[in-house]
Amino acid sequence: MEIETKFYLNELPSCVIEVMSVDYPKDRLKVRYLTGETLFLISISGENLANNWTEIKKENEMESIQETLAERGKVYGDFKNHAKITQLLKGVILQEQGYSRLSNSQREALDMIFHKVGRIINGDPNYIDSWVDIVGYAQLEVDELKAKEEFDRIEDHSAKRFPRNAGKE
């Protein structure tokens, strides 16, 4: 079946994966498209395809966001309570003198670890990904500290072999 040019197919975004059918005489285009992990099947009026596409896309993106929030809520629990737990945890270390000695990456690693702990306390404590994430953030900091130790060792060794003030006396 031929699609008349009034459907402006060149204006469809690249996320369109299949034009499924044209419904004559109602001039509706049925399209399947993918955003993120969500597959949508829609019908678009042929005369104002660009305008209708924008509106339908916005509506479907909002539905997709709501679906994502609902799924995450099942695993992590109520967001407001999670935020309370996480902010309480972070507040404890902010008051301590040692916090000022932390590097930005150490602070961020702890922030993310507390975020994950908050999810565990507030949501499903058996959700393995939360525990794996904690290990991951700790490992990033371990890797950074090991790299710094190695750099300091090499720099110290170089300083002993090639003193900066040698021959200036």
Image (spheres, rainbow, N blue to C red):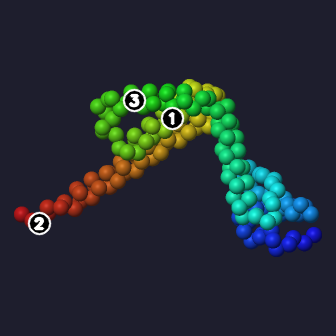
Q: Residue at x 81, y 71 (%)?
A: 6
- SS for dot 1: helix
Q: Point out the tag, 3 or 2, that comes first from the N-terminus.
A: 3
Specify the label residue 115 is tagged with. Answer: 1
The single residue placed furthest to the left in the displayed view is 169
Specify the label residue 125 is tagged with. Answer: none
Looking at the rendered image, the quarter that the N terminus falls into is bottom right
Provide the residue designation for mark 3: 91
Q: Residue at x 59, y 35 (%)?
A: 130
In this view, the residue in front, 49 or 169, is 49
Q: Kindly tell me whether residue 36 is visible in this rendering.
A: no
Q: Amino acid at mark 2?
A: Gly
Crowding at mark 1 (Cα within 10 Å: few <14, some 14-19, many 20+): many
- SS for dot 2: loop
Image location (x, y in percent) of residue 97:
29, 31
Q: Residue at x 36, y 49 (%)?
A: 148
Using residue 50 as the reference point, say whether residue 135 is left or right of it: left
Q: Point out the tag, 1 or 2, that comes first from the N-terminus.
A: 1
Provide the residue designation for mark 2: 167
